[in-house]
Image (spheres, grey):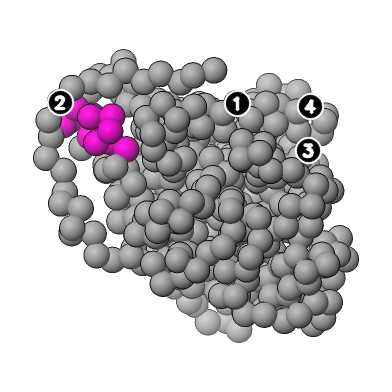
């Protein structure tokens, strides 16, 4: 089904594209893509300015009593980028590299991601600057609860709904839900998603992002006339997203020839035993020592001669420095922002078909939406129903973006941004400006 956009005619002054110099700044990268799509949509000047700025940016200091009796103070962020289409939705990450610019970019990406798959959420993101690998469970719990208390005024099922992200998980979500519930005086399961199933989590949520990647890879292969069986795949990042994507693509008949995480990368042209690697990581928490395959560098994994590359780790792993060396026919962006904006044109010129992050990894937020719906209704679905509904949304969204790409003769990323921004802009026009 063709996706038609009605394009208004306006003239506005936008930042000079030549001022984009910092390839490593994720917010600038997101904004450059936003500007490209906004120019094609020809947004009204006022609406352009509204969509270019986050609604709320929160910075909190988080004092935590450490196990040794000392008090450490951490910095936490929460950014609500846009809530015009519904409650803000976005994960919380614990990492030493967290910055406000990164959190703003991720919150914006969540806004566009939710709009691409047409679920009634806006976008948000949060993060705490810390090294969770050096902290005990009790220290992490105290950190999580104090951070939650610091941002509690924006949290709620109707306002802002967190989820797991880098270095956070079901247990962290349980602590957030409990802290919020204690403050409001009653159990509120819908305040977070990605919770344990026993306390209102959804079946299929843990696998959802990786499953969504598998679905759009199959759609991309079909579009390019490539068979699924025997398709070679390299997966960079072997956490929840990468490992599940690898496992499901293997189950569909693809040959996963390379996997890697921050500790090590392995290559085997005959195919990696994905299930054995997952079993190893479940015990060791990393791939180092797995030993089955040729050890290669993480940089070499990205430039292997494969059909499909799935970057499923952190931002900016594909830049102008290595984009020209990418030999994959398809890139499925399992991570948020794995490709710098400056690298997009290089990949396009080389004929690489990129399924952009705001579409490729939207399976997670889609099933988070399902979880939120189930919590609010108090009625829970079977895993098969969750997976079937996820597939329907991912396939429809891929085809809508592909149709727009053909209609406007732009790449998939630009088409995805156009579709997302147009949906958010439409709601802003309908709602007007409160004054």
* Quadrant of the rendering where the C terminus is positioned: top left
Q: Residues under labels 1 and 2: Cα distance?
A: 31 Å
Other residues around mark 2 within 10 Å, as few (<14) / some (14–19) / many (≥20)? few
Up-down relation of residue 216 to residue 335 (above or below): above
Marks 1,2: beta carbons within 8 A = no
Q: Position of residue 370 (x, y in %)?
A: 66, 30
Per the image, the residue denoted by label 2 is: 10
Visible residue check, residue 374: no
- The part of the image, by quadrant, that contains residue 211 is top right
In the rendered structure, find residue 396 and report the number of the disc placed on it. Answer: 1
Marks 4,2: beta carbons within 8 A = no
Q: Earlier in the sequence, mark 3 or mark 4?
A: 3
Q: Residues under labels 1 and 3: Cα distance?
A: 22 Å
In the rendered structure, find residue 94 and report the number of the disc placed on it. Answer: none
In front: 275, or 270?
270
From the viewer's perspective, tell me whether residue 423 is left or right of residue 278: left
Q: Position of residue 134 (x, y in %)?
A: 62, 79
């Amino acid at each position: 089904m063709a996706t038609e956009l009605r394009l208004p005619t306006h003239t506005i002054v936008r930042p000079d594209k030549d001022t984009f110099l910092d390839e490593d700044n994720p917010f600038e990268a997101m904004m450059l893509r936003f500007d490209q799509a906004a120019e094609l949509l020809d947004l009204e000047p006022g609406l352009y300015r509204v969509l270019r700025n986050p609604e709320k940016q929160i910075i909190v200091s988080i004092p935590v009593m450490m196990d040794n009796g000392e008090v450490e103070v951490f910095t936490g962020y929460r950014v609500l980028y846009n809530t015009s289409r519904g409650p803000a939705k976005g994960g919380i990450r614990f990492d030493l590299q967290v910055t406000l610019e990164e959190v703003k970019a991720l919150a914006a990406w969540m806004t566009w991601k939710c709009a691409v798959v047409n679920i009634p959420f806006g976008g948000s993101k949060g993060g705490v600057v810390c090294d969770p690998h050096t902290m005990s469970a009790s220290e992490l719990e105290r950190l999580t609860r104090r951070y939650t208390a610091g941002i509690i005024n924006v949290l709620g099922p109707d306002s802002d709904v967190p989820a797991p992200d880098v270095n956070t998980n079901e247990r962290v979500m349980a602590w957030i839900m409990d802290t919020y519930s204690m403050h409001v005086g009653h159990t509120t399961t819908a305040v977070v998603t990605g919770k344990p199933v026993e306390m209102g989590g959804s079946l299929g949520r843990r696998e959802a992002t990786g499953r969504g990647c598998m679905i759009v890879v199959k759609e991309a292969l079909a579009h390019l006339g490539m068979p699924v069986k025997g398709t070679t795949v390299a997966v960079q990042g072997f956490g929840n997203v990468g490992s599940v994507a690898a496992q499901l693509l293997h189950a569909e008949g693809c040959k996963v020839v390379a996997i890697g995480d921050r500790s090590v990368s392995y290559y085997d042209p005959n195919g990696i035993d994905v299930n054995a690697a997952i079993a190893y990581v479940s015990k060791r928490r990393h791939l180092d020592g797995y030993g089955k395959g040729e050890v290669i560098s993480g940089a070499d994994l990205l430039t292997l001669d494969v059909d499909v590359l799935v970057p499923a780790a952190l931002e900016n792993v594909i830049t102008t420095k290595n984009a020209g060396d990418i030999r994959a026919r398809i890139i499925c962006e399992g991570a948020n922002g794995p490709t710098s904006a400056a690298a997009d044109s290089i990949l396009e010129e080389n004929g690489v078909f990129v399924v952009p992050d705001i579409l490729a990894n939207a399976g997670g937020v889609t099933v988070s939406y399902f979880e939120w719906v189930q919590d609010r209704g108090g009625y829970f679905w079977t895993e098969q129903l969750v997976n079937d509904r996820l597939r329907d949304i991912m396939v429809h969204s891929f085809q809508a973006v592909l149709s727009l790409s053909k209609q406007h003769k732009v790449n998939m990323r630009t088409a995805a941004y156009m579709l997302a921004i147009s949906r958010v802009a439409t709601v802003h026009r309908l709602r007007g400006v409160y004054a």
